[in-house]
Image (spheres, rainbow, N blue to C red):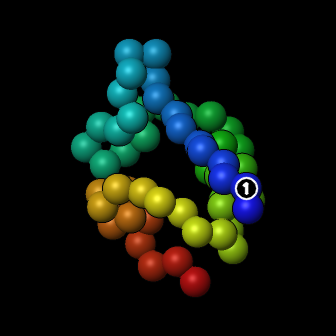
Amino acid sequence: MSIKIIAALSTNRVIGDKGKIPWFIRGELKRFKDITMGHNVVMGRKTYESIGKVP
């Protein structure tokens, strides 16, 4: 079994601001989806709620 940890934070150590990601990096969310789809993902409640229903 392998475990991958993905974490992102801004230069001032912020991971979110009012339910939004405080930065924009083109392709970042696609890469996250490519890595995590079809796998178990551990996340906080607010992140889970912000994603919405995932197929």
Q: Quadrant of the N terminus?
A: bottom right
Q: Element under label 1?
A: loop
> Front-most of 45 and 19?
45
Whether residue 3 can be seen here:
yes
Q: Position of residue 23 (x, y in %)?
A: 49, 31
Residue 19 lies, with reference to residue 13, above or below; the image says: below
Q: For residue 17, what is the image quadrant?
A: top left
Residue 3 placement, left or right of 53: right
Q: Residue furthest bottom?
A: 55
Residue positioned 25% across, 43% down in the render: 18
Q: Which residue is mark 1?
A: 2
Q: Quadrant of the C terminus?
A: bottom right
Residue positioned 33% across, 66% down in the render: 49
Residue 28 lies, with reference to residue 43, above or below; the image says: above
Question: Mark 1: which amino acid?
Answer: Ser
| Count of picture labels | 1
Q: Residue furthest front?
A: 1
Whether residue 35 can be seen here:
no
Q: Position of residue 31 (x, y in %)?
A: 72, 50
Residue positioned 39% across, 35% down in the render: 15
Q: Badge 1: how crowded within 10 Å, few (<14), some, or many (20+)? A: few
Residue 55 lies, with reference to residue 50, above or below; the image says: below
Q: Residue furthest left?
A: 18
Residue 28 lies, with reference to residue 37, above or below; the image says: above
Residue 36 placement, left or right of 12: right
Q: For residue 26, what is the image quadrant?
A: top right
